[in-house]
Image: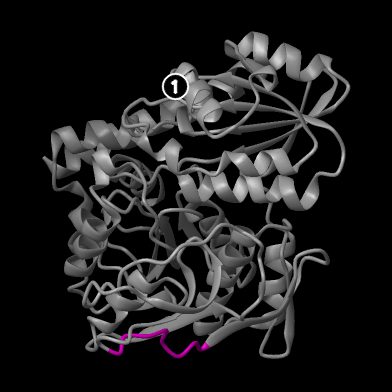
Amino acid sequence: MSYFALLIGKLLRFCLNVFGRGSSLPGKIALKIDENILSKFDFPSLVIFVTGTNGKTSTTHYLSNILSEAQYKTMTNLAGANLVQGIVTQALEYSSFNFTIQADAVVLEVDEATLPNIIEDIKPSHILMLNLFPDQEDRFGSVEELAIKLNKALVTDSKLILNANDPRLAWIGESHPELAITYYGVDKISLIQPSHSILCPNCQQELSYQWQHYEHLGYYSCSSCGFKTPFVQYMARKVDLNQQVFDLDDFSYPIPQATSYTLFNVLAAVSLALDLEIKEETIHSAIEGTEIVRGRNEKIEFADKKIAVNLAKNPAGMNQSISNLLSQETENYNLMLAINNQAADGVSIAWLKDCDFTRLLETPLQHIYLSGSVRKDLYQILLNQGIPKNKLSIEEIASGLEKLTTHPENAYIIANYTSLNNIYKYIK
């Protein structure tokens, strides 16, 4: 049955490639034939999982480029197909007919809820964790519940590469003294972004912060149980977002986009690459050569107008997108906010109330066009936060894009998953 699933999956994958269509359908069909097919593949010894709430796709791109630059034949799921069917689809493409993955290294973006379900089938050598923010609570549960699930899933001999500035990830590391663990972090620099404290993940008392980067990331300690920021092996110092560089161990690395989340994503990839003893020059070259991921602060052209597009799927992502406008935009601009609440986005829209839209009033904002399935709800949320009514209008995607591109001001789009896909289908 497994071999039949492999043949059908490979045939379907071949047909889709012929017609230039990317899809997780081959993996979905193969799983229907044999639900255990993922365990049948023979993976190489170097298998890296990249997981966390924000930054998985970009970090996977950086890391896979670094490994390729270092002459590893690398299997990866760069299209962001991070659920089990997407991962099986990539395995089908890279495997021989005896289930052997024909690659020296595997770098997989793995959905946070998917990781516990596949970790025994693939057995990663390294798990790179980026951050844990509230996101799609109707699917993941609370962020505390997600941290507990991930913590319980770590029963392999994987090496953990963890963001020391995230208390929940540090708690996961502290919970596994039997595993090899490396921490990365950013030095105490001001990123001028919204921040808040969280409860100690160890004893549920309020954490004290000596420094905060954004949201709950920073340097922290608990006076009740002694939990604190762990020792950071890979520290980003001399960070300059204007010049788009940071130093690590007296070597300078580029930050391809002048954003705080790009800094953390690049640092995560660099840290794991250094842990694999890849040369600094190779890492630098690979990062410089990495193309911008679709929808991640991407610049597109539509109707002879350049538009900056960014994905935001939770409060942390939205607040960072707004911070980018605060730090970068000095000229008048118009903004489209496009938000859906389909299954892939998370049905609940409660997260929008946790976004600090009032900070948009500190920018030269002219008008906001609201689109997507929850545009009316979003309209009310913005009004409640003090955004003037005359700066808001509810639009379908087509009319919103038309108005965004016909006005002379600069143009921006912030959208979540399915609304971003709808926008790209329309403009391309």
Q: 330 left or right of 18? A: right
- Picture layout, residue 87 above or below residue 390: below
Q: Which residue is mark 1?
A: 377
Q: Residue at x 46, y 56 (%)?
A: 75
- Picture layout, residue 277 above or below residue 346: below
Residue 313 point in image, percent of width and height: 47, 40
Q: Residue furthest left?
A: 1
- Picture layout, residue 305 above or below residue 119: above
Q: For residue 232: magenta?
A: yes
Residue 35 point in image, percent of width and height: 13, 42
Q: Name the residue nearer the viewer: 307 or 120.
A: 307
Q: Residue at x 23, y 36 (%)?
A: 30
Q: Residue 399: which quarter of the image?
A: top right
Q: Residue 63: which quarter of the image?
A: bottom right
Q: Residues within 10 Å of mark 1 (few under 14, many from 20)?
A: some
Q: For residue 402: magenta?
A: no
Q: Name the residue nearer the viewer: 286 or 146.
A: 146
Residue 295 appearing in the image? no
Quadrant the C terminus occupies = top right
Local SS, label 1: helix
Q: Residue at x 64, y 65 (%)?
A: 263
Q: 383 left or right of 239? A: left
